[in-house]
Amino acid sequence: MILQAQARGAAIIGRGAVSSLGSDLNALWHGIATGVCGIRPITRFSTSDFGVTTGAQVVAELEPRCLDFAVSDSHAAETLCHALAVRAAREALINAKLWDHNAEHAHPGIAFIFGTGMVPVSRSLHEFVSSVADQCGLDGIRLAVSTACSSSTTAIGLSLDLLATDSARFVLAGGADVLSAEVFAGFHSLGVLTPTRCAPFSRPSGTSLGEGAGFLVLAREGAARAAGHEVFGLIGGYGLSCDAWHETSPDPGGSGIARAVEFALADAGISPDAIDYVNAHGSGTQANDGAEWLGISRALGKRMVPAPVSSSPSMTR
């Protein structure tokens, strides 16, 4: 079978989120708009053996009552990740008016791309993703993505490929991760956690860990508008790269980051002069922030000065 490529880009017609700032998208946006910080003392597990005690933990009422992280950290993390993912995914589908309230499942034919970077699972990642899809009644293509911190963003980018090849009419894309003692200990051992709060491109150096889930429902713009869907925004293109410099650190010169930005601009068919704002990864660590700044600067050139750069980890992780 030969697939006819459609125009690149996608329209955002649905959004859903769960984070340390609240249980839905409105809470997340209100927190960001008003400068609320979701980084607070961790209560889920003991941090007495660590030099850092804070993280961006979701509110306690979102955790299933059956969970006991003290008994089984990995099982509890998997269960919580599943619950947060289903909650945010359903919100996005309802927001897109693609949820059947009578049958309690999504409309047919929606593809699902799920990204996660840290959650430990007792089964294969694809089985976990299929379980989330089943809970939402999704019967389209199902894909799992795990590219560390960029997992959910990669999932959204791959959605453009499904839409461009007419492999799906709608795509639900995003992901979820949770904060567990195992993950916290791993990052603490690397010495990259800050005892205060993450301060991207500033001081003190160090990152904060967080958790949550977020999804977008995407469709081709023309089809979305013709069907009467509200369009919240447009995604023109995406870019991927891998500099293979080190297991936990990027190329200090930012070469991989620069290529990803350049590929995204080319995919969207726009020049650096069209960029008015950059939302960065901004992990807060010295190695990552320095490389990211250089990479963005190389890709945008003279446009880097007037285009503001910021990131959200100072509030949500």
Image (spheres, rainbow, N blue to C red):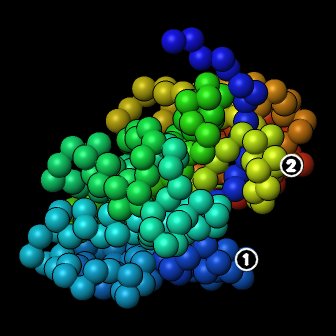
Viewer-closest of 190 and 277: 277
Residue at screen point 75% across, 56% down: 229
Mark 1 and 2 residues: CB-CB less than 8 Å, in contact?
Answer: no
Residue 219 horizontal side relative to residue 7, left or right: left
Q: Is residue 167 above or below residue 209?
A: above
Q: CA distance from mark 1 to mark 2?
A: 19 Å
Residue at screen point 29% across, 42% down: 126
Q: Position of residue 255 (x, y in %)?
A: 60, 27
Mark 1 residue element: helix
The local crowd at label 1, few if under 14, some if 14 to 19, many if 20 or more residues have their Cα within 10 Å, is: few
Q: Position of residue 230 (x, y in %)?
A: 78, 60
The residue that disc 2 covers is 276
Mark 2 residue element: loop
Residue farthest left in this picture = 71
Please, what is the three-letter code of the amino acid marked with disc 2? Asp
First reached walking from the N terminus: tag 1 or tag 2: 1
Residue at screen point 41% across, 57% down: 137
Q: Which mark is residue 33?
A: 1
Viewer-closest of 179 and 192: 179
Please, what is the three-letter code of the amino acid marked with disc 1? Ala
Q: How many marks?
A: 2
Q: Is residue 1 above or below residue 153?
A: above
Q: Position of residue 293 (x, y in %)?
A: 66, 43
Q: Position of residue 100 (x, y in %)?
A: 53, 66
Residue 80 horizontal side relative to residue 272, left or right: left
Q: Is residue 51 above or below residue 230?
A: below
Q: Is residue 273 above or below residue 282?
A: above
